Every structure is written in structure tokens, then in C-alpha cells.
Image (cartoon, helix red, strand yellow):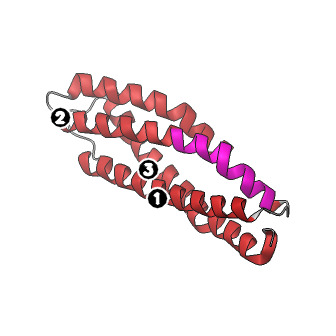
Amino acid sequence: MISAHHDYLREELPVLGSLIEKVNGVHGENHPELRDVEAEFRNLAAEMHDHIDEEEQELFPVVGRLDRGESLADEEATRLREAVWTFEEDHTATADRLDRIAELTDGYAVPEDACPSYRSMLDRLERLERDTHMHVHKENNVLFPRAEEQLSAGTAEA
């Protein structure tokens, strides 16, 4: 998951942020919604950076221990369950931000006066949304339930 999604985000978010800023600077007068797109994206990017760092530092190591069949102390199992709940809440907030960006861009519709950079920005935003939804699906519907099954099956110490 790290190489498939986190590496992509670490590369894409700064580049896309610069592109959004450029497009807003050029087209913002005729497309005032771009100011909101830029603001929403800046918040999204900051939250995503924090989120992936926390996943890699806090969540994935503990889930990896479960995958290896290692036991967790009760307090570790409780912290893992709390972390999963927090990450699921983050995923909901991320989806809301992505929905807002899609709404602001009218579903990534290309305006008639769009230059190649504007088109690229919209394409990249749409790709970011698709990639993020797939990543969230894998975590919420595969990784997290598997971790809970392992905890419930008794990998945590009694």
C-alpha cells in the first residue's frame, strides 16, 4: 500500500499544488471557483501528508505484527482499534474534501477557455480522487476488517 499509494501522493501532491496555483493565477479572474479549489486542495494535501505519515509510523507496524501472528497486549489492541476508528474518520473527511473539489470543478469538466495546464490540473485532480477512493476502500474494507478479525481471533494477549 505504501509504494502503490503513499509514494504516489508524496510525488503528486506538491506538483499538483503548484499546478493548481499556476492555473488559478492565470484563470482565476474568469474562474473564481479556482480560488476555492486551491484552498480546498491545500487543506487536503496537508491532511493527506499527516495521514500517510501516521499510517506508516503508527498503524502499519502494528498491523504487520498481527499479520506475522504476533500477539498484542490488551492496551496495544485498544490503541489499534482507536487508531483504526480515527483513520476511518480521516477517510470520511478526505472524501468530503474530494467531493467538494469535484463539485467546484463541475465534475472536472474542462471549460472552453482551458489551456493545457488547466486540462492537466483537472485530469490530475480526477486521478487523485480515483486513487484515493481505491486506497480508502482497501484500508476500510480489507486491511481494517482483517486486523479486527485477527484481534478478535485471539492474537491479543488475554
Which residue is identified by label 3?
Answer: 129
Q: Main secondary structure of the magenta part?
A: helix
Residue 1 visible in the snapshot: no
* Disc 1 from disc 3: Cα separation: 17 Å
Which residue is identified by label 1?
Answer: 89
Seen at 59% across and 44% down, the residue is: 54
Q: What span is in magenta?
A: 50-66
Image coords of residue 153 (percent x, y)? 77, 77
Circle 1: residue type: Glu
Magenta-colored stretch includes residue 61 = yes
Circle 2: residue type: His
N-terminal label among 3 and 2: 2
**Image check: 109 left or right of 58?**
left
The residue closer to the viewer here, 96 or 151, is: 151
* Neighbour tally class for label 3: few under 14, some 14-19, many 20 plus, Cα within 10 Å: some
Which residue is identified by label 2?
Answer: 31
Image coords of residue 145 (percent x, y)? 64, 70
Q: Quadrant of residue 39?
A: top left
Circle 3: residue type: Glu
* Disc 2 from disc 1: Cα separation: 32 Å
Seen at 32% across and 23% down, the residue is: 22
Q: Are marks 2 and 1 in contact (CB under 8 Å)?
A: no
The residue closer to the viewer here, 16 or 114, is: 16
Mark 2 or 1, closer to the camera? 1
**Image check: 38 left or right of 157?**
left
